[in-house]
Image (tube, rainbow, N blue to C red):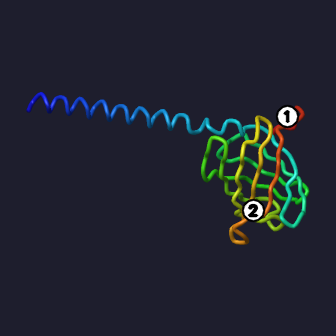
Amino acid sequence: MKSMNIHLRLFLLVGLTGALGSNHVLLAQEPESAVWLEGYWEGTGLQIDKQQWEVQLTVLDIARPMIAYPSLGCSGYWSMEQPGKSKIHYKETITDGFLKCDNGVDVFIKKLGKNKIRVTYYLYSYSEKAIAKAILKRYVPPTGDRN
């Protein structure tokens, strides 16, 4: 009975160490999964009513990118709701010009390539379908333009 107890303890210790080790590895890799989104992005958005507008996305912090819609006169930030390796869910908060843009929109970013992403906007209080989409391309701002 005593040798079985030693084997059981050893098995539990190895199993627990393995489980903790694998969790630690997953936690360490999670923030890096969206590194592809870092940088500066711009493009044109298209609403379901065919209205178009400029989009400028600045991602210096993956958890809280800054968003601007210059042609609409509003800007704000996105808060990460659910990270992913090639798709990320954000919630949009408009902080400037909030009467000109919808607030609380769900935003989904999909990686299309190294320098191209698709942004899909949902306003669930309005519709279960996407209300707008945008294709953004990575760009390098001129020196002195980085905030």
Residue 53 image offset from top left, x and y in percent: 89, 57
Residue 17 image offset from top left, x and y in percent: 34, 31
Residue at the far left in the pictured view = 1
Q: Give the distance between the C-alpha atoms of the residues marked 2 and 1, in whole angstroms.
A: 29 Å
Q: Amino acid at mark 2?
A: Ala
Using the image as rendered, state which of residue 102 and residue 2 is in the foreground: 2
> Residue at (73%, 65%) from the top-left corner?
129
Report the side of 9 relative to 89 (left or right).
left
- Check disc 2 and report its element: helix, strand or loop: loop
Circle 1 Cα neighbour tier, 10 Å, few/some/many (<14 / 14–19 / ≥20): few
Residue tagged 1 = 140
Relative to 88, does residue 99 appear above or below in the rendering?
below
Relative to 14, does residue 44 appear above or below in the rendering?
below
- Check disc 1 and report its element: helix, strand or loop: loop
Residue 74 image offset from top left, x and y in percent: 83, 59
Relative to 102, does residue 79 appear above or below in the rendering?
above
> Closer to the N terminus: mark 2 or mark 1?
2
> Residue at (50%, 38%) from the top-left corner?
27
Disc marking residue 109: none
Residue tagged 2 = 130
Report the side of 50 relative to 89 (left or right).
right
What is the quadrant of the C terminus in the image? top right
Residue 106 image offset from top left, x and y in percent: 69, 59
What is the quadrant of the N terminus in the image? top left
Circle 2 Cα neighbour tier, 10 Å, few/some/many (<14 / 14–19 / ≥20): some
Q: Residue 13, located in which quarter of the rendered image?
A: top left
Q: Amino acid at mark 1?
A: Val
Report the side of 137 relative to 14 (left or right).
right
